[in-house]
Amino acid sequence: MAETLILPQTHDRQVIYDSLVPQIAALVDSEPDLIANLANSVAALKEAFGFFWIGFYLVKENQLVLGPFQGPIACTRISYGKGVCGTAWAKGKTIIVPDVDAFPGHIACSSASKSEIVLPVFNQAGDVIMVLDIDSDQLNDFSNVDAEGLARIAALLG
């Protein structure tokens, strides 16, 4: 894949994911370096959707540690089971939060964040090795379309 994304001119997220996933697959398929693949995946998601904050937190010594991201400065470390990211890691499942102020224990890295989706990324053994965290500055900005599209991308990176 070239360093240019070809994105459909639509606001239909399903159509965008259907276009984006094979392009990310082609991008990461030929690159063995995880950090490079995470960085390009975040950039592609940012370009495609323009979300407020997009990034990965990698599991390191029983904490999530900030990895490649795009957006404002973020929390560097998150403990297991804490906030949306730590909860998604602990439960091993995707969490969609329509209003972050209503999520008990939400870790506010930015007051501009209004809604959030976090997906665990698994290795071949089924262990969570990182989470993909996306914040929006809009309330209720994520749906099952996002969960499914992002899960397809996460599966490419695990």
Image (cartoon, rainbow, N blue to C red):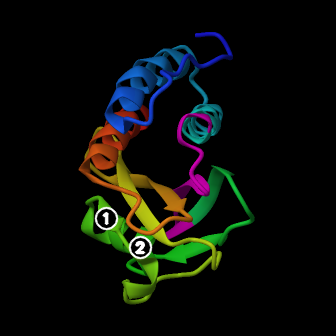
Residue drawn at (41%, 73%), measured in percent from left and top?
Answer: 84
Q: Nearer the viewer, residue 129 or 98?
A: 98
Q: Nearer the viewer, residue 36 or 149?
A: 149
> Where is mark 1, residue-wise?
95
Left or right? Give the position of 95 relative to 114. Answer: left
Residue drawn at (40%, 76%), measured in percent from left and top?
Answer: 99
Residue 13 location in percent, x, y? 38, 37
Quadrant holding the N terminus: top right
Q: Nearer the viewer, residue 151 or 6?
A: 6
Give the residue type at disc 2: Val
Residue drawn at (41%, 18%), measured in percent from left and top?
Answer: 22
Q: Are marks 1 and 2 in contact (CB under 8 Å)?
A: yes
Q: Is residue 6 magenta?
A: no
Q: Is residue 63 magenta?
A: yes
State the extent of the magenta-drawn residues as a range. Answer: 47-64
Quadrant holding the C terminus: top left
Number of marks: 2
> Where is mark 2, residue-wise?
84
Sequence-first tag of 1 and 2: 2
- The circle drawn on residue 139 is none
Residue 129 location in percent, x, y? 42, 52
Q: Residues within 10 Å of mark 1 (few under 14, many from 20)?
A: some
**Marks 1 and 2, Cα distance to the nearest angstrom?**
7 Å
Secondary structure of the residue carrying tag 2 is helix
Above or below for 150 versus 25 = below
Residue 20 location in percent, x, y? 45, 25
Residue extending furthest top?
A: 1
Residue extending furthest right?
A: 73
